[in-house]
Amino acid sequence: MRVVVEKRDTRSKRMAILIPLVSFIVSLMLGAIVLIASKSNPLQAYGAMLNGAFGNARRFQYTIVESLPLLMCGLGVGIAFRLKFWNIGAEGQYVWGAIGITWVMQFWRFLPVPMLLPVGLAVGMTLGALWAGVPGFLKAQWSVDETLTTLMLNYVAIGLAEYLYINKWKAPLGNMGTPEFPREAWLPQIWGKVHAGIFIALALVVLLWFLLYKTRWGFELNMIGKNPKAARYQGVSIKRNIVLAMILSGAICGLSGSVNTAAIAHRLTKGVNAGYGFTGIIIAWMSGLNPFASILVAVVMAALTTGADALQIAMKLPESMGEVLQGLVLIPLLAGSIFVEHKLKFIKKEAA
Amino acid sequence: MEHITKHFPGVLANDDVSLELYPGQVLALLGENGAGKSTLMNMLVGLYRPDGGTIHIRGELAEIHSPQDSMALGIGMIHQEFMLVGNMSVAENIVLGLRDLPLVPKLDEIKARITELSKRYGLQVDPDAIIHDLSVGEQQRVEILKLVYRGADILILDEPTAVLTPGESRDLNNILKKMLSEGKSAIFITHKMDEVIEFSHKVQVLRRGKTVNTCDTKDVTPRDLANMMVGRDVLFSLDRCPFNPGGIKLKVDHVTVDNPLGSRPLLDDVSLEIHRGEIVGIAGVAGNGQTQLTEAITGLLRCNKGTIAIDGRDMTNATPLQVIKAGVSHIPADRGAMGVVGDMSVGENLAMKKYRTEEISRGAVIKKTFMRAFADKLIKAFTIKTPDQDTCVKFLSGGNIQKTILAREIDSCGGVLIAVYPSRGLDVGATEAVRQNLISQRDKGNAVLLVSEELEELQMVADKIAVMFEGKIMGLRNVKETNTEELGMMMAGAGSVRREA
């Protein structure tokens, strides 16, 4: 018997839903193998994870809080990905958002206190946009490879943030971290741990969906992403749109950093580069660049993180096991996507 | 092949088609676009799987699941678009993808074998040449060599002469004859009648996925074949208003475009005027600057010297959008790569010019209902064969993709229509429609620039013909005052004596 991969004649909608589901089940089974190997009961472990992520209101809130920066970064990089512009600099843009809001909170004291939060969010967003605009411009003007520039600029941003909270902007007390933002300027909590950032994130989902699927600009981005040569021939400026898309992409990632800083840490400190920008890439990819699907993916990814914490406590498993399971979820999902366009064919060997 | 059936969403591409090919024989497969010729052949080379029916090769039942399977059976296909890697050498391209290739190939042995094969069949190609530097005809020879090198003895050629000059076509015919004398056989997909007569022994006509007729070539006339293909009588002449040109619409003045890769400029001091209500044809062998001329006008290529003006307004090095807004429509040479976005729907592709206008959008927002109505209107007006407007363009046949482009460009035309090889690869019926459309644009008072490789087409459609050779315009002639011989001489670079028409 021989197995060959054949291209499907059409893309089937049913498969587009079925395949991720099957992939998810496969990844659970792979995870089970790893868990058994480390002498744990997989059912118990998955139960603990589920319980840890959604078990009670507090845990559920924590999962949602964790999903918000993931969702926003996913939305941000997703815009650049539409143009096949591989923005892997969301992490740096996120950090700039955090730096921006801290700058305002700490040094723009001439502003009335109620103004600090909105202005801080705006400044963080702008800095993220500028940071992303640079590689966009370099690519548009001189075709400088964006994967390198966006990746490298991450480390510049992270390094700068470290310098600021360890040295330049450090609070007089403690050994790292800037002073706490004034309490009145925090992003308010609306349901337990869940903060008002959820409204910003959901508004962004709707806004982006409208922008990408309903407007002329969305149509142009779609054309560029699918056939840049044809887009140029139809009068769409590729250079201009690359820069614009990168600015928007960076603005959203920056906003994500500002929102999270104003809601959770309330200052610039260690842990600002928590990897949301990198996980955002996975979210954009797995959601098929669809803003609404991103919500679901972000919650699942967040649940894997919060669930893994519970795994550590309930099952006495090392923290890294959570990351192993997270990774195992991704591989079948990404590998499975090939079957949306291809199918397997089993051929019985004939007598020669 | 027996009783082959193949469904695509919404279409029955092949309906119970049977086909026989004997050693040493050339079978011409004739049919309109979307008649199912390419689909049938793609099943033979393993790109598609038939839904029903069987394939026997040399008497044995064959299960072809991939191009590798078909290669192992000695079947090779030359597609309309060549599958060559542009920046690699001829020899490298020929052995690329061979399964039994050692990690470090012995290039000398390979080259020797290539030279031997090219001598045997009269396929002169330098194995060290880089594909980029070869003409289209030479590239085709590389494709043939690739198949022969792999031991193919059933060759499938998908419209091989569409990209060749008359001379190159004759060479191809000779090459094929030599191969046939060795017992190889060939299937020839085409919709040019005279080629069928010249090249083939047997001809099979397909229409809407069914075999209409199979007969010996010597028993039929081109006219019979055309009627069989279309299923009705075909007009070989076109209606047109008397030639009555208006003022100058488009003026290209001493334009030069440098070639960053070579010494000879892509366009060399080109001047051309097109009046309202006039069709100027550009003749010449492909690759002599015709495409560059159209791209310079449409803002896709920067001019280094000279000026371009539309309605007397300077448009030199304007952006593509500015040129579009000045009313220029453009049917590009490369349909798949430039003309359409394959992964977007027919409806969206039709709207790709007009989406900026009130007809489809309100401000920055695209109105889906307007877009759908607009697309339905064009699909109907230009008889584009598609299951529905939501189908991706890449699933349409070549002719219908061209109709989609044509519909969009003609609908949005605001004074200048630039058409590059608009009927390339189209069947009789569609070609007739394209030509009639060009002429009706002219009759409406628009300026039309038609680039074509077929002199016959230019003589039938154009009012004036300019010939391009090595980036220069060799001369401009009034159609009525010139003949094929004179134009042919200019295409080959002779007759640089300018005479204003």
Image: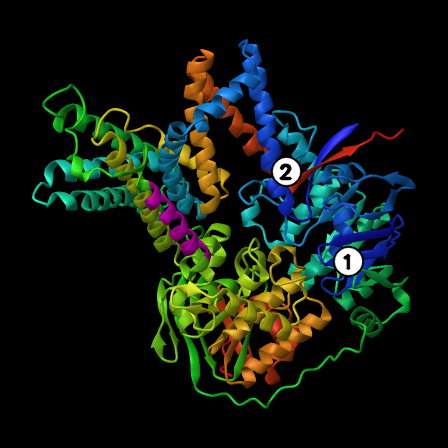
Q: Amino acid at mark 2?
A: Phe
Residue B266 in view: no
| Residue found 30% across the figure and 41% down from its top | A196
The residue depicted at 83 percent of the width and 57 percent of the height is B15
Q: Secondary structure at mark 2?
A: helix
Disc 1 from disc 2: Cα separation:
25 Å
**Residue nearer the viewer, A216 or B61:** A216
Give left or right: position of A216 versus B109: left
Neighbour class for label 1 at 10 Å: few (<14), some, many (≥20)?
some
Q: Compared with residue B58, is residue B271 higher up or lower down, i.e. above or below?
A: below
Q: Say whether residue B122 is left or right of residue A43.
A: right
Establish if A117 lies above or below A154. Answer: below
Q: Please give the count of numbered marks on the rendered protein.
A: 2
User: Residue B32: x, y in percent?
Assistant: 74, 65
- In the rendered image, is residue B397 in sight? yes
Judged from this view, the residue extending furthest toward the left is: A110
Residue A39 % position (x, y): 55, 9
Write down the residue under mark 2: A339
Magenta span: chief secondary structure? helix
Query: Label 1, on which residue?
Result: B12
Q: Which stretch appears magenta? A: A198-213
* Quadrant location, the C terminus of chain A: top right
Using the image, name the chain to which the residue with label 1 belongs: B
Does dot 1 land on a helix, a strand or a loop?
strand
Out of B455 and B396, give the one closest to the viewer: B396
B223 relative to B347, above or below: below
Mark 2, Cα crowd under 10 Å, few <14 / some 14-19 / many 20+, is: some
> Which amino acid lies under the numbered mark 1 shown in the image of this protein?
Leu
Q: Chain of mark 2?
A: A
Q: Is residue B222 above or below residue A48?
A: below
